[in-house]
Image (tube, rainbow, N blue to C red):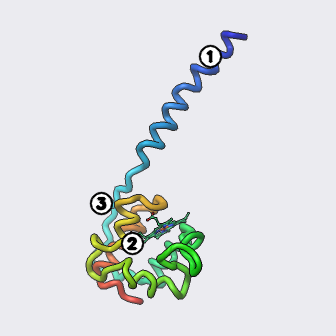
Amino acid sequence: MKKLLKIALLSSLPLLMFSCYYDEFPEVVEQEDVVIPPETIVSFADDIAPIFATYNCTQCHNTSGQNPDLTAGNAYASLLSGYVTPENSTSSKLYIQLADNGHRNVDANSIALIKKWIDDGAENN
Ligand code: HEC
């Protein structure tokens, strides 16, 4: 019985270490790997807003919740009131929060789309 316990403890050790490793070092988003062709026109309605739906951003970012309000119909105005600086993704809170802070682990392709949309002028297109 004692021996069994030892085996159980020993075999769970790597598992414990592995889970700690993941807690300490969350996966880094390698968005450099994603290239959106320069001629591509990124649409707010068709490309950006659906990202907020996919990741359930509105669970927290809604009209009575956390700013920016990312609900359909409100997202654009809310983002442009301080979270997105047109033509300057690297100084835009939306981009910094997702690309640098790893907020909600958004996939590299979505982050690249957001970057291009902002750098192309953040239009309500
Ligand atoms: C579980 C709740 C939750 C979800 C889901 C969530 N957020 Fe947030 N978000 C927060 C909180 C809390 C803050 C404020 C604290 C902080 O900056 O982390 C925040 C802050 C932000 C900010 C402002 C950062 C700043 O510098 O002021 C942006 C932009 C943002 N979130 C975008 C998003 C997007 C886009 C999604 C979906 C991909 C998302 N959030 C999903 C809770 C959430």
Task: Count residues near mark 2 (Cα–Cα under 10 Å), then give few for <14, some for 14-19, many for 20+.
Answer: many
Q: Is residue 78 left or right of residue 119?
A: right
Q: Is residue 25 left or right of residue 18?
A: left
Place of residue 84 in the rendered image (x, y in percent of width and height, measured from the top left) = 35, 79
Task: Count residues near mark 3 (Cα–Cα under 10 Å), then give few for <14, some for 14-19, many for 20+.
Answer: few
Q: Secondary structure at mark 3?
A: helix
Residue in front for this viewpoint, 93 or 98: 93
Q: Quote the CA–CA distance across marks 2 and 3.
A: 18 Å
Q: In this rendering, does residue 113 appear at all?
A: no
Q: Secondary structure at mark 1?
A: helix
The residue sitting at 44% across, 87% down in the picture is 77
The residue sitting at 48% across, 76% down in the picture is 67
Q: Secondary structure at mark 2?
A: helix
Point out the tag, 2 or 3, that comes first from the N-terminus: 3
Quadrant including the C terminus: bottom left
Q: Quote the CA–CA distance across marks 2 and 1.
A: 48 Å
Q: Amino acid at mark 2?
A: Leu
Q: Is residue 115 above or below residue 10?
A: below
Determine if the C-beta at disc 3 is less than 8 A from ligand 1.
Answer: no
Q: Is residue 61 above or below residue 34?
A: below
Q: In this rendering, does residue 123 appear at all?
A: yes
Mark 3, residue position: 32
Mark 2, residue position: 94
Q: Which mark's residue is nearer the viewer, 2 or 1? A: 2
Residue in front for this viewpoint, 30 or 99: 99
Q: Is residue 3 above or below residue 97?
A: above
Task: Count residues near mark 1 (Cα–Cα under 10 Å), then give few for <14, some for 14-19, many for 20+.
Answer: few
> Residue 7, labelled with which disc?
1
Q: Which mark's residue is nearer the viewer, 2 or 3? A: 2
Q: Amino acid at mark 1?
A: Ile
Place of residue 53 in the rendered image (x, y in percent of width and height, measured from the top left) = 56, 73
